[in-house]
Image (tube, rainbow, N blue to C red):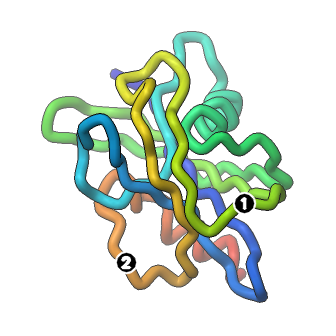
Amino acid sequence: MRQRVNLLITRAFEARLQLLVFLEIAPEPLLDVLQTPGGTIEPGEEPLRAAFREANEETGLANFGHARFLGETIFEGTTETVHIHGFHLTCVEETPAIWDHCVTGTGTDDGMTFRLRWIDLPLQETLRPPFNLFLDRLTEELTG
């Protein structure tokens, strides 16, 4: 069973809390849905280490002030079953509201371009599974 991390990356901006999301834009989108960063845990890699690696590979960001484990679950996808570890990372570096990033790494998204953007919490847009799996736990963490 493949192991992966799902990342909910937030920042505080003008007294609002925002979540980082993206769309695949080039060369050819694999999924035409709003996503959050994440990816496969390499053999022998600790999930938290994978969280930081995937965050950097998929966003270009490198500075996080907070990392919290949100939980894990088994997700039954259409083509495979995946063991997903959820993490909340707090971004502490200055970023634009929207930017394009060419993904690095060894995954299927290597070389793809993602259009990343910050959206206000609570969300007014829908994230579908598996990207929304730990959103309720993040909300609980932030409010209580």
Q: In the image, is 76 to the left or to the right of 73?
A: left
Residue 97 locus on image (x, y percent): 62, 68
Image quarter hosting the C terminus: bottom right
Amino acid type, mark 1: Thr
- Kindly give the residue lying farthest to the top in the view shown: 44
Quarter of the view holding residue 56: top right
Report the residue marked by disc 1: 95
Q: Are marks 2 and 1 in contact (CB under 8 Å)?
A: no
Is 20 or 131 nearer to us in this picture? 20
Is 42 or 54 nearer to us in this picture? 54
Mark sitting on residue 125: 2
Label 1: state its secondary structure: loop
Q: In the image, is 87 to the left or to the right of 100?
A: right
**Residue at image location 66% in from the left, 24% down from the top:** 46
Above/below status of 125 relative to 93: below
Q: Which of the marked residues, 2 or 1, is nearer the chain's N terminus?
A: 1
Above/below status of 47 relative to 11: above
Residue 89 locus on image (x, y percent): 70, 53
Residue 36 locus on image (x, y percent): 47, 54
Amino acid type, mark 2: Glu
Label 2: state its secondary structure: loop
Q: Residues within 10 Å of mark 2 (few under 14, many from 20)?
A: few
Image quarter hosting the N terminus: top left
- Kindly give the residue lying farthest to the left in the view shown: 78
Q: In the image, is 77 to the left or to the right of 19?
A: left
Q: In the image, is 84 to the left or to the right of 48?
A: left
**Residue at image location 47% in from the left, 34% down from the top:** 39
